[in-house]
Image (tube, rainbow, N blue to C red):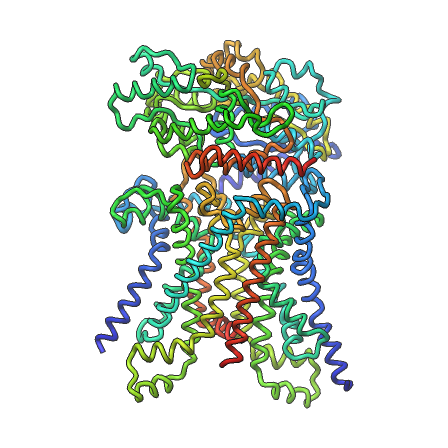
Amino acid sequence: MRRAAWLLAALALAAGCAERPRGAEPATIVFKHAKILGPLDPIPGLLREFERRNPGVRVRSEALTWTSDEQHQFYVINLDGATPTFDVLLLDLIWVPEFAQAGWLLDLSPWVTRDELAPHFPAAAAASVWNDRVWGLPWNMNVGVLYHRADLLRKYGLAPPRTWEELVEQAQRIRAGERDPRLEGVVWQGKQYEGLVVNVLEHFWANSTALLDEHDRVLPEPDRAAAALAFMRGLIERGVSPAMVTAGDEEGTRRVFGDGRAIFLRSWPYAMDLFEAADSPVRGRVGIARLPGHAGGAAGVGATGGFHLAVNRRTRHAEAAVALVRFLAGAEGQRAIAEAAVALYPTRVDLYRDPAAIRAHPHMPRFHALALGGRPRPVTPYYLMLSTTVQPEFSAAVVGVKTPEQALDYAKRRLEYMLSGLR
Amino acid sequence: MTARERADRRTGLLFVAPALLALATLTVYPGLWVLWLSLQERIPIFGIAHFVGVRHFAFLAVDARFWNATRVTLVFTGVSVALELALGLAVALALQRQRAGRRLALSLLLLAWALPSVVTAKLFEWLYHPSAGLVNVVLGGHAFNWLGDPRLALPGLIAADVWRTMPFVALLCYARLLTIPPEVYEAARVDGAGRTATLAWITLPLLRSILLVALLFRTLDALRAFDLMFVLTGGGPAGTTETLTVYAYRSLFQTLQLGFGAAIGCVIFALVMLVAWGYLRALRGEGAAA
Amino acid sequence: MSGRRAADAMVLLLLAVWAVPYFWQVRTSFTPDRELLATTRVTPAHPTLVHYRAVAEKSVMPRALGNSLGVASLTTLLALLLGVPAAYAIARLPLPGKSLLLLIVIASTAFPQIATVSPLYLLLRTLGLRDTWTALVLANTSFALPLLIWLLAGFIREIPIELEEAAFLDGAGRPTVLRLVILPLIAPGVASAALLTFLAAWNEFLFAYTFTATEASRTVPVALALFPGVFEIPWGDIAAASILASLPPVIIVIALQRWLVHGLVAGALKD
């Protein structure tokens, strides 16, 4: 079997060499992206289509490592002072200002006008711009949402909660009624990583405060922030959330809810496709709602996330690379992703009303409204530095090793020290 | 100087020059450079590089996270080294009396020491698994959350480190015990000394210098330890296993602040050098007294 | 004599218990996923090679093993090349400022890697050497070389000076003496020092984690630390990867215990 494969590969290689006309070497651009698992991956098809429309250009696809941290480390090492081995890259949108500031991205402004950004969600479009220049194009969108067991809420005559306090009451009522000791109230991501910062920020915003205000002041209302953190810790102490959330990430918590063991889950849109899969225990019983606010605070709002396409500044094939980026982020590229029924959501707003896309993702209209109301994390080149500085403090508060006041006091001092050194 | 001595001098310089060059570039130069770095605000990817004097050190002096890391480092070092020495000595004494199966015994002992630290970390991560881990199973099925509970993580880390390094101490002591001529024990037996007396008055004094050497090596290694805690717990949960080295590494390569991270590195550097100097003076004192 | 036998057996048993964590990992590497939580059995009910197959075919471990082998071998080679002559010079030849040199060498062995990693990072960045074998070999040499020099100088000093003087009378120069007289005599010491260097370079993690970015240069410890788990942690695969990662060091240490003991004794007692 293996030998046959080798033979085939050798034949293909020979055929490929024979086909190429002498003297007309194609420009090969390398596209670095996270692999989409499964047979429905639309990327290879899209890349072949792009090659068809751009004769003389070949695109080679290379996989990124799995976790966000590793991808970031990979990019830092390879973009900082090294020769470029890839031309087009897929970035977490929180890295766009950082990479732009570091001078690693090609300024796309000569090619991409603001009109081209208009069809995308405002939050996604805003994340592509830094210092008034365009550095990337949005590719897929994420927003924090509240999943709930619609069947259970219906059974007890409840509507999705509008505040976290209401959520706690509902969870307690349902658990008392169901008498299932394994049924948890709400699960969320509390492990010490970027996901925790997202969860904490959402609680801050729900309590009418933020990590940085418009003047880049750190924790402008420490009392409100402490109250939000205390609430999160309280969820665990009161047993509304299981202790495992302090080690919980997206997949760990998704499984708990997906196995029917939780009433509420805070997560991203991708999970819905998995809940609606044929063998899912909660198929047909999951509802989507806006994240709750806090009593006495503001309305709930989900953090936005997603990936953007950008071009390495040191690319030797700028035209081709930019063309690829515009193609993938364009109507056709995004439609292919939307229709592929992989757990990725496009950033072009009109696709959320498109019948073909909705057939693949029946819940798209719901996410549309939620995405429009999403809020970005602090947009600054130093976001990763900020995040890694506050992660241990937030974790200490959530685990209960420090009081929220202690944790935030330290976080404030540390962040101010860091930011003052940058100026 | 004779012609021969002049020739020797030339040859000596020739022999030593390449190694000296390598050491100067790779060890000494970085050793000095890190001091210079610690006085700067240096973030390479943004091209930030300016002199800030002792600003970082002033911050560290009042930084709660720094003092927590110092405490964790000292507790880790103290407890680990004490356990390693006690257990290592016991094993060496047992091995000395071993008649059959010495090679097998040494092989079993050295297994733990041979493993790369990352392998040990993964090994213990699995052993400490709350439901499937061997440790909890042996303890009767209680689901202790070894790596997630702030009170259990540091003891768990120390246990892993002792497991890994005790063989080294045992080996050192065992090697030294091998060099003690059997006549010494013969003489002791003839004099009517019992087992405990022989141990206390003959064996232990002879082991004193090697124990001090083991103490030196192990203390320096424990102060500089990084791999095990970084991979096993990452410094968590909530900083309960964050040693100075982990704090430094996170500052250096997670927040990309080379200046601040270098400052923490310098503190570790100074601590290690201080301990080394202190021990060497004690050892020289031993040598003079012996 | 049976009391002695019983004591011997007891010691062997206790040491076997000490090594249980390793044996448990071996057991886990042959245990299928569905049995991983069934810890009441000592051996798995249906031992399987699926984890080893996964590691060999789908992970970066094979490449990482190649990288580790290359980096560790080259580090040892470079350290020996630089260290043997230097050790001889320090042990035997009149050098200006020898005590200072010795101090630098000994102090270098105590330099914490966490302190030198940031300057080395900047240095390698400037030289454009990140994600290469060269970077790791150089970084490893920074701690391997002083250690090697210190160990070898100790061995050389043990050799009676008369042997060299006899060679000088026969008209040999210093380099020849080093090659034909000293080296054969310290060969066991060199072998054990080389093995220790190889081991240290194989097990090295901090520099490798910082200076490598892709499987082009990733060594075994880094590959193991970054072992991918898509959803849940693949304990069985990690166990298999761990056993493979530890095979070379374990084989070296077990098979060559005698050399190791010799090396540690000589180096440690020469203080």
At 56% from the left edge and 58% from the top edge, which residue is drawn? B271
The picture places residue A252, in percent across and down from the top left corner, at 40, 32
In front: C254, or A155?
A: A155
Residue B120 seen: yes
Q: Quadrant of the C terminus of chain C?
A: bottom right
- Above-or-below relation of C164 to A14: below
- Left or right of A371 on screen, residue B197: left
- Left or right of C267 on screen, residue B86: left
The picture places residue A100, in percent across and down from the top left corner, at 68, 31
Most extreme residue toward the left is C2
Q: Quadrant of the N terminus of chain C?
A: bottom left
At 60% from the left edge and 77% from the top edge, which residue is drawn? C183
In front: B5, or C199?
A: B5
The picture places residue A232, in percent across and down from the top left corner, at 42, 28
The picture places residue A338, in percent across and down from the top left corner, at 52, 18
At 44% from the left edge and 30% from the top edge, which residue is drawn? A189
- Left or right of B67 on screen, residue A127: right
